[in-house]
Amino acid sequence: VISPNQTVTLSEIDAAHGGTAAGVQQTGQRIGSAGGTAAASGLFFAVLSTSGFDAAISSGLVVSVGFVAAALVVALAEVVLARRTARA
């Protein structure tokens, strides 16, 4: 759902460790994408079998929006923590 800018994400990494860090980042993105797709589609098909298409698509969308909201909360927490650390 969310594709971070790799330049910004890896900007604090030493160049000697850049390849490893990029590999870890890509692995995390792949796992997150697979988990999100599995959760949204799994719920979609579970609801589809009992309640119809409209309820199923709504449920899948709620899961997707929930993941985006969780990512936003984590990003905001990181910004707040960085500002508090910079002041100290």
Image: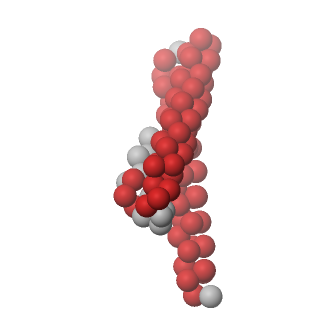
Query: The N terminus lies in which quarter of the figure?
Result: top left
Above or below, 25 against 76 in this view is above
- Residue 45, picture quadrant: top right
In this rendered view, identify the residue nearer to me: 65 or 8: 8
Q: How many marks?
A: 0
Residue 70 percent coordinates (x, y) = 58, 51
- Residue beneath the point at 37% across and 58% down: 7
Residue 12 percent coordinates (x, y) = 47, 66
Above or below, 9 against 29 in this view is below
Residue 19 percent coordinates (x, y) = 45, 49
One can see residue 36 in this view = no
Residue 71 percent coordinates (x, y) = 54, 52
- Residue beneath the point at 62% across and 18% down: 46
Please, which residue is most extreme toward the top here? 49
Above or below, 67 against 53 in this view is below
- Residue 50, picture quadrant: top right
In this rendered view, identify the residue nearer to me: 13 or 50: 13
One can see residue 6 in this view = yes
- Residue beneath the point at 39% across and 53% down: 6
Query: The C terminus lies in which quarter of the figure?
Result: bottom right
Task: Tell me if 84 is positioned left or right of 61 in this view.
Answer: right
- Residue beneath the point at 58% across and 32% down: 35
In this rendered view, identify the residue nearer to me: 72 or 3: 3
Colour setup of the view: secondary structure
